[in-house]
Image (cartoon, rainbow, N blue to C red):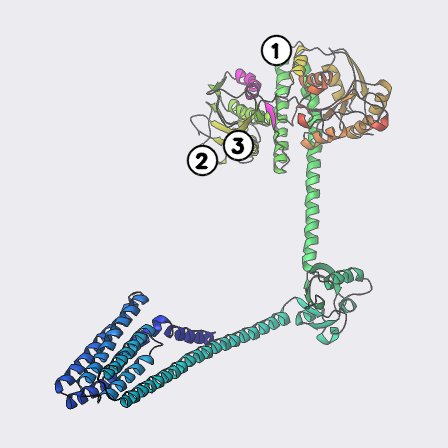
Amino acid sequence: MSETRAENQSLATFESKNSPEGLLRRYARGRVRYFAARQIATIGGSLALGILVAPIYGVIVVLLAVVGEGVDCMVLYRIPALLDRGVPLHRLMRLTTLTAGLQALTIAATVVIAQATAVGGEASLFSFAFLAAAVLNAGVVRRYNKAAANLRIWIYTATAIVGFAAELLREESVEGLLYNAFGLSMLAFNSYAFLRHTNGLERRRVADERQLLLGQVELAQSNAELVRSRDEVRQLALIARHANDAILLLDPQMRILWVNDGLSRMKGFTFDQVVGRSPVEVFTDSDSDCAQVEVVMARAFAGEAVRTEYPNYTKDGRKIWIEAAFSPVMDEDGQLAEMIVTERDITEAKQRAGELADAKERAEAGARAKAAFLATMSHEIRTPMNGVIGMTDILTDSPLTEDQEGCVMTIRNSAEALLKIINDILEYSKLEADKVAILEEPFSLRTCLREASDILRPQAREKGLYLDICHEAPLPDLVLGDSGRLRQILINLLGNAVKFTETGGVTLTTRARTRGGITDLSVRVQDTGIGVPADRAHEIFDQFEQADTDTTRRHGGTGLGLSISRQIAERMGGGLSLCTVQDRGACFELSLKLAVTEAQASPTAVAKSVAESGTLAPLRLLLAEDNRTNRLLVKRFLADFPMDIIEAVNGGEAVEQVVRNAPDVILMDMSMPVLDGIAATRSIRALDGAQPWIIALTANAFASDRAACMDAGMDDFLCKPLRKSALLAALARAQSDPAQQAVEENPLGPQSFDSVSGSSTPAHEATLWTSPHESGTTSGRSIRLSAR
């Protein structure tokens, strides 16, 4: 590399010297350096003139010559400095040409003086010889400054012509003039031939030197490339020989031409043991799938770069897994010349992948077991809770003494507190599993806020607290979002505010700003309670955290409510934060971005009015429930309504009752012997004839359970513990216009807990459902909002 740089530098220096600027610099240096040498001829001529003619003429000649040369050399002496200062080259070329002309004119003047002062033609030879010397001096440097040299030569030539013309005017003998003419012509021709030869030699010398330098550069580059190629070959050889991977070189007949040491380390075979043989022959055994390897090799030998995995066997019979990359090398005709195969032992990676797959399977099995456990616990706890809460609802409608009413309310409040804990745990589990779905449905903000506050108002009234709602700006009529999740957050915040406030009250304040169809909603829940200690404010949203242990003992709870509310708010694209701390009460702010819509909210007014008025049209109801307490509870709820209730204690009996009695509505429990609710529903939907309206009745409170019910063909969904109002609303929906069916949220908890709900399918995705074509029924009485 250093040699290449040196040769390139030599060539660059040569080109710089022979560039127009370089030639001008050399011209200037040469003229200045040889100033004294040029004056020898001038001084000799002036001496001869002074001796032969008169001393004064010798002095004049010397002065003229020195003045011309002096001016020219002084200018040329400054040329390098002027070039370094950046004076344009063309300006300096013109300046040196002018000074060269001045110097030539002084020389011509000396010749004219010599010829004019001589008597007769005695000085002709002297004059022409002096001019010839001046022409030769100018011609030999013509390559360096062509304009200056040409100007000098033309001046000298003109001077010779003028001198010859002067001789003609003297009327000398014709013979003498002819001799002078021939002599002058021969002198001119010889001078021209000499200069032509000299300048030609100089041009060829420069050209030869340039070619020599170019050749040296090319040679240095070739040497450097050869060194690089040698080093690269050496490095590649080292890589190929010492690489951990096995590298094989195959010929077009799939025979091994060469292998590196990595193959010996990987498989135990030596170079001599594998060369000339096929890899299939050497590295497989009778149990190997040779066809797969041969197919891969056939693709590779067809010119396709292939990467694959297959098992091989080492020399000692051990099975290993190989990742092989086939890289074909094609010749000029597009035919395979050689094949490079790089093999890597991935046995350990395969084992780790298997272990990871096993671990993943175990984790998924654990997740399934956890989900099954939560579902079982939900069912096992909610089933007796259904009886407890349901019976307290019935007792509250009965005439009771004050003590009895207090006992009933204690039972109900305790059951609802336990239900709240269960709901928190299940909701937390769903959030952890990322199973919480956020809906985008039109709803009324005012209604949602009012319903949430109405739920907590009785508790506030019992404690002597006020619960106010303040709207600082008008709210949009309808927005898109998940009203159930918003209600869940508000109930949690209002519930905590009422729980932790002993005097004063709670204020819910809203701020709304709508721009570009998006409403920035801020909801603040401010209480006058104990507040949050400053040193615990940053932990209040952590899971299982409360202000202190005394708070847990006095007020209960799991410490999950705020954590769940914040996670839901964030999944809805907003946030939940604490605004104030202890001694000033607590203030929590919920912020959301909701799209304003003009679509109609899910109409549930019909179901609400029917449920609240206590009027239902007569119908035949099949109650499929294996739990005696739950059957008793439903019958007591519906005792005042005109209904023909048929009971079934398992799924098989429910199917038989449908065939035998053709009920209008079925309350279908999900966990029954013989056939569960899902299997029973599918069997019923496969029957001919009019189809009943089927309402799922389950203690499993997961969205996946809701989806499973709807996929099986059910029309509605009730979650235990069952409330009378929820049951009546579901029956009202069954009797109303099917196209107007919608989800009826339970105001006592989150959407998925203790709620009356229909299909979660948006209305625009709904399809009409009828009995299967193969059943022979063209239309069924049940037309449901559900995307199948």
Q: Which residue is mark 2?
A: 535
Residue 485, image quadrant: top right
Task: Specify few, some or many for label 2: CA neighbours under 10 Å numbering under 14, 14-19, or 20 or more.
Answer: few
| 1 or 2: tag closer to the N-terminus | 1
Given residues 214 and 721, the one toward you in this image is: 214
Q: Which residue is mark 1?
A: 402
Given residues 339 and 510, the one toward you in this image is: 339
Q: Secondary structure at mark 3?
A: loop
Where does the magenta region start and end? Answer: 435-464
Amino acid type, mark 2 = Asp
| 3 or 2: tag closer to the N-terminus | 2
Residue 131, image quadrant: bottom left
User: Relative to 674, is 325 above or below?
Assistant: below
Query: Can you tell which mark lies on residue 574?
Result: 3
Residue visible at 66% across and 72% down in the picture: 261
Task: Specify few, some or many for label 3: CA neighbours under 10 Å numbering under 14, 14-19, or 20 or more.
Answer: some
Residue 348, image quadrant: bottom right
Q: CA distance from mark 3 to mark 2?
A: 25 Å
Amino acid type, mark 1 = Glu
Classify residue 756 as left or right of residue 631: left
Place of residue 38 in the rendered image (x, y in percent of width and height, measured from the top left): 25, 83
Residue visible at 49% across and 78% down in the picture: 215
